[in-house]
Structure formats: C-alpha cells, structure tokens
Amino acid sequence: MENKIRIGALISGGGTNLQAVIDSCESGEINGSIVFIGTDNPKAKGLQRAKKHGIPSFIVDYTSIIRSYKTLPEKVKMPSDFDFQDILKKQSIFSDKDNPERIKAFLYTRAAAEAGILDKIKDYPFDLLILAGFMRNLTPYFIDSVNTTPGKPKIMNIHPALLPSFPGVDGYGDTFRYGCKVGGCTVHFIDYGEDSGPIIGQRAFDITKEDTLDTIKEKGLKLEWELYPECIRLFSEGRLKILKKIHTLESGKQYKRTVADIV
C-alpha cells in the first residue's frame, strides 16, 4: 500500500497500548509500521515486544540523569541549542508560584534526557510519535524539535481519563476516588502543558457501585486498545486537522481553543 506512515513509540512499562498498535499495523488496519521503540526505563517489559517483532529499540535512563543533576548539576551535559529562558516562557506545566529551583531542575534534566532521545531517533525518520504509557512530561525543547511544521503536530498520547478532567499520572484512580459515574480514555496531541493538547478522540464507560479501581482499569484498557489504533489510523489517512476556534460566552467574552477535527 502507498503512503505507509512511519511510527515511533516511547514507553515506560509493559506497552499494552503499543502492542495494540503493532497488531493493527501488522493486520493492515493502520497503514503504517513501528520504526523504533524508546524507553526511559531500562526494565520496561515493553522492550520484549520490540525484540519479538524485530523493532529497533533504545533506552535513555532518565533516573540516572536526574540523580546526576542532584549530585553535580554542572556535570550534566546540556544540548548546545538548549535555551532555558525560551523553554521556561513556553512551558505551562508549572505556574509562577512554583519553586524556581524545582522548575529549573525539571527543565534541565528533562531536556538533557530528551537530547538523548533525539540523538537516538535521528537515524529513524518518522511521521508520528506515539506515547504509549510514557510516564515523562515532554518539554518545549523536545516538542519543538519534533513538531517542525506549524499546525501539524506529530506527537500523540493516550490518557486514562476523560480530559480535560483528571490530567496527570493516575487518571483512572482520580476518576474512581472522585466518585464519577462515567470514566473513559482520551487520545490527544501533545502541547506544552500536562495532558492539555487538542483532543482527537474519546471513549467512555459506565461506573457502577460494584466497580473497584481494578475493574475500572480493566474497562478502560479495553477501550484504550480500540481507541488508540483508531486515532492513529485517522492520522495515517490524513483526516486530522488542527483548527483554532473562537467561542463567545453569554457574557460576550471570547476565548480561543485549539481542536483536532476529523475530516
């Protein structure tokens, strides 16, 4: 088939969503193939999936970089194009009220690690980068290095909650503890915030009084394995378009939203 897309993947754990995407590529549901799998975790079980399917893989050990920075920050090698003030201005994970040293440590260590990822993937051209359980926030340094064409984002993520509710690392847990009657998952493009990018697709499930956190996760994962390949397929078919929309409230106040429309 023509116009087969090249997909890169970043993982931190077992990679079950990654497997769903691999299977969809191999079955032809997605007109594409996985060209590399990277991880921040040397013990990630998803690396075995890469080996099984003959996909190149690599490790960039974030923990070691963070530990080195805490011990001797001046010894952490920063990329030559790293501009702290530019990245600080763009990021929206932290607020002005957060500890400046904490923000600096985060941006420095993450950018140092991201430079390692960028170095690893330079030999594997790709059209789309998917985060499949990658448990690290990306900085504007990395995002801008990947998203080189304005209006055409190419980093996609799946989140275990119905965004914009419950961003962060424990979407299903937050949904359960809040007492929601409906849970779900969301696929979105990455932006400079935490799980705040344009939403591509969502799936929902009912939460009953008999449900536990474990059963909620089971329900959610089944939907994730369906939704992620579907959204990647839409990308591969060129059916996702980023639009800037202006909404007017009853008060007359306007606000802008960036959305991913399906065409």
Image (cartoon, grey):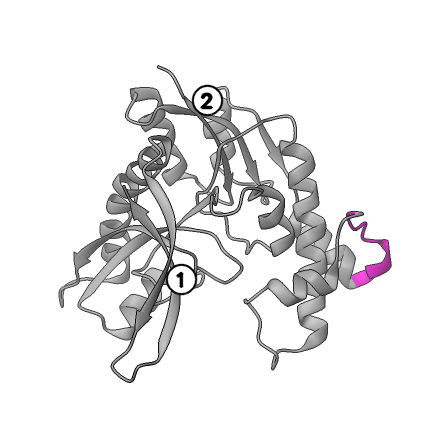
Q: Amino acid at mark 1?
A: Asp
Residue occupying image coordinates x 74% and y 61%:
84
Toward the top, the furthest residue is 1
Q: Would residue 96 be seen by someone viewing this image from the given angle? A: yes
Image coords of residue 259 (percent x, y): 36, 55
State the mark number for residue 150: none
Image quarter of the C terminus = top left
Q: Choose between 229 and 50: the one closer to the eye.
A: 229
Residue range of the region highlighted in magenta in the rendering: 71-79
State the mark number for residue 170: 1
Image coords of residue 46 (percent x, y): 47, 36
State the mark number for residue 52: 2
- In which quarter of the view is residue 258 placed? bottom left
Image coords of residue 172 (percent x, y): 32, 61
Residue occupying image coordinates x 72% and y 59%:
108
Q: Is residue 242 magenta?
A: no
Rate crowding at label 1 as few (under 14), some (14 to 19) or many (20 or more) other CA atoms within 10 Å. Answer: few
Q: Choose between 195 and 11: the one closer to the eye.
A: 195
Kindly indicate whether the residue at mark 2 contacts the one at mark 1 (C-beta within 8 angstroms): no
How far apart marks 1 and 2 lie (CA) works out to 29 Å
Count of labels in the image:
2
Residue occupying image coordinates x 72% and y 73%:
101
Q: Choose between 240 and 102: the one closer to the eye.
A: 240
Question: Is 69 left, or right, of 158 in this rendering?
Answer: right
Residue occupying image coordinates x 29% and y 47%:
221
Where disc 1 sits, the SS reads loop
